Image: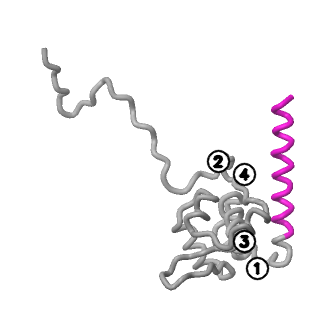
Amino acid sequence: MPKAAPRRGRKPLNKPPKPKQKRGRKSLKEPVDETMFVELPSDEELSKKLYYSIGEVCDMFQINPSSVRHWETEFSFLKPRKNKKGDRFFNATELKKVHLIYYLLRYKKYSIEAAKDYLKKHKDETDARFELVKSLQQIKQFLLTIKADL
């Protein structure tokens, strides 16, 4: 006996509901766990390779290439090297700058204008503060692993 086709205007009963799409900017209420685990490799690892392509940078930070290109236009200190074709290549210092911008925009939830102002006001202290925050995050992760082992 053939199956009867579902009537117009009604959903079939055997299909599960579609999961809600998560598009656009994330809510400030959501946890920022995914940004905490984004860490650059050590300086020794970064120095093994002279330049990183924009695709490799985006894979490190789990962001779109368009975000990195937009940050390049907004932040004047971020100047990756370009070849004749226009491909962007980032060295270790540029990667650290991208990491700082990523931290301010995604983890601290600053707008681009607020991040620019922050970098202008705290020009000398920014690198030291950022290194301090990174080391504190590493200590926190270490303590959490010890707690999980107990």
> Magenta segment: does it hold 146?
yes
Q: Give the alpha-carbon distance from disc 4 to disc 2, as whole Å.
A: 16 Å
* The disc label shown at residue 61, or none: none
> Magenta segment: does it hold 38?
no
Q: Amino acid at mark 4?
A: Met
Give the residue at the far front of this rendering.
48
Q: Nearer the viewer, residue 120 or 135?
A: 135
* The disc label shown at residue 120, or none: 1
Residue beneath the point at 67% across and 60% down: 109
Residue behind mark 2: 29
Q: Earlier in the sequence, mark 3 or mark 4?
A: 4
* Number of the front mark, 3 or 1: 3
**What is the span of residues highlighted in magenta in the rendered image?**
128-150
Using the image, determine if residue 16 lies above or below residue 109.
above
Identify the element where label 1 is drawn: helix
Give the residue at the far top of this rendering.
1
